[in-house]
C-alpha cells in the first residue's frame, strides 16, 4: 500500500520534544460539517433510557455491561451533571451527552471515512507505525455549562500494549478555547514514562496506582481552531477543565496502537471479540 509520511522533520522533532503536535486545518470545513451533521442524526435516533453516566473522576462506578460493550458499538454516555435530583434530564438529550464511543470509526460510514483516510494513515506512517489499528473513537461534546472536567491522565494507561504504542488524534470540530474547555498538557512529560494503568478485574475497572499530584503551573493550554488536529503521545500528561461557557466544544478523537511487535494487554478494560483491521501494513 502506497502510504507516505506527511509530517516534516521539524514537526517530528517538535512532537518528540513536546509530546504533542498541533496541525492546523487538518480537516476541511466539509469534513467537519459532515461529522457534526451525522452526530446530530445519531443523537436524534437513540433511546436515552438505556445509557450510562460517564465520569473521568470516578471510573470505578462505570463498570456496567453497556460500558464494556461500547468497545464494539456506538454507545452514548451522559454528563454527570445532566440529571436533576428527580433522575430526569435537566436539558434536552442533545445538550446532556458527554460523549459517544467507542466504535464510530468502524460502524458509521461518515466517521469511518475520515478515520481511515490517507491523511490519517500518513501521520501514523510518519510516526513509525508498521501495522496500526484504531482501538477506539470518541465524539466528545463538552457541553455548555455542564461539560465535565477530564482529570490529568496518560492515554497509555487505558490502552496499554507491550511495549507501549498508543497515540491520540484529537480533532477540534469547534474552536477550543480557555473558556470552553480546551486541552492542557505538560510539555515533555511523555519522557517520564507511564505512571499507572487502568485495569479490568473481576469486580470492575480500577487504577493500579493512585494518581500522581501535578502542579497546574506546569500545564500549558492548547487553544486551537476548528479543523486543527492535536497529536498526543501516549505518555503525555494532559487534561481539560469544565466548560463554563455558553459554547460547546465538540471534538472527535481516535486512539491508535501498533500491532507489529506490540502486544495488546489482556487486562485492559477494552476486550474485543473481533480484532480491528489495520489501517495499513508497512513493509
Image (cartoon, rainbow, N blue to C red):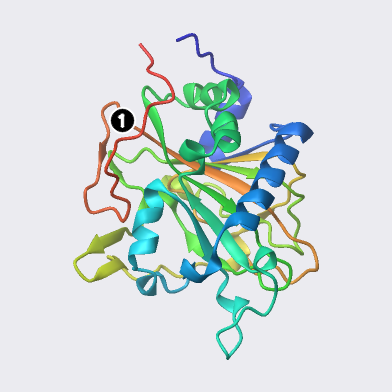
Q: Nearer the viewer, residue 47 or 277?
A: 47
Q: Which residue corresponds to the image point at 52% horizontal and 28% vertical from the top-left?
A: 116
Q: Where, quadrant-wise, is the N terminus in this rendering?
A: top left
The local crowd at label 1, few if under 14, some if 14 to 19, many if 20 or more residues have their Cα within 10 Å, is: some
Where residue 213 appears, as percent x and y from the top left, is 45, 70
Classify residue 161 by image quadrant: top left
Q: In the rendered image, is residue 113 in sight?
A: yes
Rendering quarter of residue 202: bottom left
Q: Is residue 112 above or below residue 225?
A: above
Name the residue tied to disc 1. 259
Query: In the rendered image of this protein, does residue 135 appear above or below residue 118?
Result: below
Q: Residue furthest right?
A: 246
| Residue at screen point 57% across, 49% down | 187
Outermost residue to the left: 202
Query: Can you say which quadrant of the picture contains the C terminus?
Result: top left
* Residue 229 screen position, x and y as percent: 65, 39
Dot 1 falls on a residue whose secondary structure is loop
Q: Is residue 119 above or below residue 109?
A: above
Measured as percent of width and height from the top left, residue 233 is found at 48, 42
Seen at 58% across and 29% down, the residue is 113
Amino acid at each position: 500500500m502506497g502510504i507516505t509520511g506527511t509530517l516534516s522533520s521539524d514537526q517530528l522533532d517538535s512532537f518528540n520534544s513536546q509530546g504533542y503536535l498541533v496541525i492546523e486545518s487538518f480537516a476541511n470545513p466539509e469534513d467537519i460539517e459532515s461529522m457534526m451533521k451525522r452526530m446530530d442524526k445519531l443523537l436524534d435516533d437513540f433511546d436515552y433510557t438505556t445509557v450510562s453516566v460517564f465520569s473521568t473522576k470516578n471510573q470505578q462506578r462505570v463498570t456496567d455491561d453497556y460500558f464494556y460493550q461500547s468497545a464494539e458499538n456506538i454507545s452514548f454516555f451522559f454528563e454527570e451533571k445532566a440529571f436533576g435530583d428527580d433522575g430526569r434530564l435537566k436539558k434536552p438529550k442533545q445538550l446532556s451527552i458527554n460523549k459517544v464511543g467507542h466504535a464510530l470509526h468502524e460502524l458509521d460510514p461518515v466517521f469511518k471515512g475520515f478515520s481511515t483516510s490517507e491523511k490519517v494513515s500518513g501521520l501514523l506512517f510518519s510516526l513509525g507505525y508498521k501495522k496500526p489499528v484504531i482501538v477506539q473513537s470518541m465524539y466528545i461534546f463538552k457541553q455548555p455549562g455542564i461539560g465535565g472536567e477530564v482529570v490529568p491522565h496518560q492515554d497509555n494507561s487505558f490502552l496499554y500494549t507491550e511495549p507501549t504504542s498508543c497515540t491520540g488524534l484529537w480533532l477540534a470540530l469547534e474552536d477550543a478555547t480557555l473558556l470552553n474547555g480546551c486541552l492542557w498538557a505538560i510539555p515533555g512529560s511523555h519522557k517520564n514514562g507511564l505512571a499507572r494503568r487502568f485495569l479490568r478485574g473481576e469486580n470492575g475497572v480500577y487504577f493500579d496506582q493512585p494518581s500522581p499530584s501535578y502542579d497546574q503551573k506546569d500545564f500549558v493550554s492548547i487553544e486551537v481552531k476548528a479543523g486543527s488536529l492535536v497529536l498526543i503521545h501516549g505518555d503525555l500528561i494532559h487534561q481539560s477543565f469544565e466548560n463554563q461557557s455558553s459554547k460547546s466544544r465538540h471534538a472527535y478523537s481516535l486512539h491508535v496502537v501498533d500491532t507489529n511487535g506490540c502486544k495488546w494487554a489482556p487486562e485492559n478494560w477494552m476486550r474485543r471479540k473481533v480484532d480491528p483491521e489495520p489501517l495499513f501494513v508497512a513493509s
